[in-house]
Image: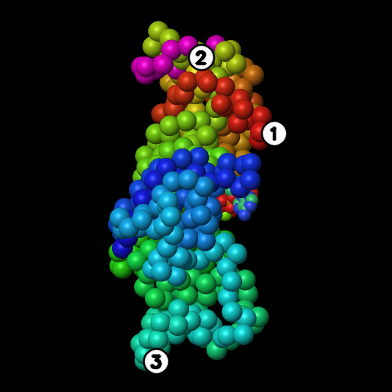
Amino acid sequence: MSTVTIDHISKSFGESLVLKEINETFQDGEFVTLLGPSGCGKSTILRIIAGFEKPTSGNLYIDDQLVTGGKTFVPPEKRGIGMVFQSYAVWPHMNVFDNVAYPLTIKKVSKSEIKKSVEQVLEITHLTQYADRFPSQLSGGQQQRIALARAMVAAPKLLLLDEPLSNLDAKLRESMRFEIKEIQKKTGISVVYVTHDQSEAMTMSDRIFLIHRGVVQQSGTPVEIYDTPKNQFVADFLGKVDFFKGEAGNGRIVFPAMDGQSVAYDGPLTGKVDVGIRPENICFSPDGELQGVLETQYYLGDVDDCRVRAGDTLIRVIANGYEYHSLKEGQQIRMAVRSFMVFEDDGSLDQMLKIRT
Ligand SMILES: Nc1ncnc2c1ncn2[C@@H]1O[C@H](COP(=O)(O)OP(=O)(O)OP(=O)(O)O)[C@@H](O)[C@H]1O
Ligand SMILES: [Mg+2]
């Protein structure tokens, strides 16, 4: 159980500044996830916390003890941290049991205690039946679980996990998510978890830190980040969203590209805005404010994924399949927007969309 305080930490590799003044505290017993696209700096933050990388400036505290900063540098092995690296390394000459036991063996823990602890984590990571095998006789996902078991066996107060489930199939991934979360809740250890998988972040985290280009764009509970994103990038990164250019004023937002159709709006912004609508927040409804022509409809079993043309714009609607499967392509249809997000048009959306295409 540890607090981690990242105090104005920046990191450059040569000319390139990859972390820009990160200033955050992770609480005792908290499950924190660093989420963001490839190259945004997630692993670098984790490696600085672990002590495998030194920041260019700033201080790092674990439980109020300065571990990196000024002339102070506490080496990784003295930080009481368990870590699974993105490129996990297991000892090829040791069998699974000995690999997992390693952190306890070097601490000179008694044989009977080692056996008990190792068997417990092997069970949790579904590796019991492979205890006698060598890594070369195991799949990538099984090797990844050895790394996870080894990081947990010494019951560290802080566990740093860098994409620890990336090599597992979907089913095992889901069950391991649940197992890691359960262990964390039971033991109360602090976890800093790195992923670019948003559903993993949503299901496991107490708080998510969404990072883009070395800056924390927003932090908050999964609900806060999903429902009230601070900017277009955050809205786009979590979940599905379509953006529409609008003009806010006189209690409405007008969409020029939808032949001037509009929705009611009582928020504070006026003038040019970017409106984000999540497709699950728009539905077909006879008295809805927007209308268009149903252009395509994909039946997905549980829902219908539809595109409706309004002027020059395509609007995506995820509709309940059972209720709407009788709709015909080409038919005029009305839509009600249950909720939407409004952002100032500061040019960032255009930039984002340009990078994507
Ligand atoms: N040792 C290094 N030398 C030079 N540049 C580096 C070094 N380590 C990382 N970088 C650069 O720093 C940036 C952040 O890297 P980092 O590994 O933290 O990204 P990430 O968010 O973990 O990405 P991914 O999701 O792909 O793992 C990248 O642009 C990367 O190329
Ligand atoms: Mg990484």
Q: Secondary structure at mark 3?
A: helix
Tell me the residue that label 2 is attached to: 272
Q: Earlier along the polypeptide chain: callout 2 or callout 3?
A: 3
Q: How many residues crowd mark 2 within 10 Å: few (<14), some (14–19), many (20+)?
A: some
Q: CA distance from mark 3 to mark 1?
A: 58 Å
Tell me the residue that label 1 is attached to: 357
Q: How many residues crowd mark 1 within 10 Å: few (<14), some (14–19), many (20+)?
A: few
Q: CA distance from mark 1 to mark 2?
A: 23 Å
Q: Given the image, on which type of amino acid does mark 1 rest?
A: Thr
- Given contact means CB atoms under 8 Å apart, are the residues at marks 2 and 3 in contact? no
What residue appears at the point 31 percent right and 53 percent down from the top-left corner? Answer: 27
Q: Quadrant of the N terminus?
A: bottom left
Residue 242 showing in the rendered view: yes
Q: In this image, 1 relative to 41: left or right?
A: left
What residue appears at the point 40 percent right and 8 percent down from the top-left corner? Answer: 250
Where residue 239 sits: x, y (%)?
A: 50, 41
Tell me the residue that label 3 is attached to: 111
- Furthest toward the right, the residue is 357
- Furthest toward the top, the residue is 250
Reply yes or no: does residue 330 show up in magenta.
no
